[in-house]
Amino acid sequence: EAQGIHRMGFDWMDKMEALAKTRECEVQGFWAKKIDLTVPFMLNFSPDGKLQRVVVRKLGCEKLETLVGGAILQLAQAGEYRPTGQNQMGWYRSEYNFILQ
């Protein structure tokens, strides 16, 4: 369950902006002058609530996928996403919207 209390640090957006400006990644919503990218992801928690795995939708650019995964991992480790106990498999599914104009 998302808590809504933690935010991604500016360092992550700085890294994403720098990558966008290189134009290495041709991904819809990820441009040199504007980022408006919504990325679905899944988190896997162990039965005792510890984060086990972060899965980010393939975007077609490994560098961008790594950055997005790192940002989601940071949020999860800070407690933004927590298991509710309603899902026996321990998976949490959501999406994150990265916007920079």
Image (tube, grey):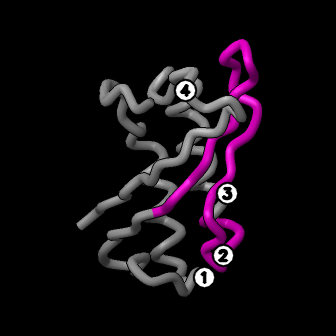
Dot 1 alpha-carbon crowd within 10 angstroms: few under 14, some 14 to 19, many 20 or more: few
Q: Which residue is mark 1?
A: 24
Residue pictured at 68% horizontal, 44% vertical: 54
Which amino acid is tagged 3? Answer: Thr
Residue at the top extreme of this rendering: 48
What residue is pinned by disc 4?
86
**Most distant residue in the left direction:** 101
Q: Are marks 4 and 3 in contact (CB under 8 Å)?
A: no
Mark 2: few/some/many CA within 10 Å (<14, 14-19, 20+): few
What amino acid type should be assigned to the residue bearing mark 4? Gln
Disc 2 to disc 3, C-alpha distance: 9 Å
Q: Residue at x 48, y 65 (%)?
A: 18
Residue at image location 66% in from the left, 17% down from the top: 49
Percent coordinates x, y for residue 89 in the rendering: 72, 35
Cα separation, mark 2 vs mark 4, equals 34 Å
Kindly identify the amino acid type of the residue bearing the numbered disc 2. Answer: Cys
Look at the image and give the residue range highlighted in magenta.
39-64
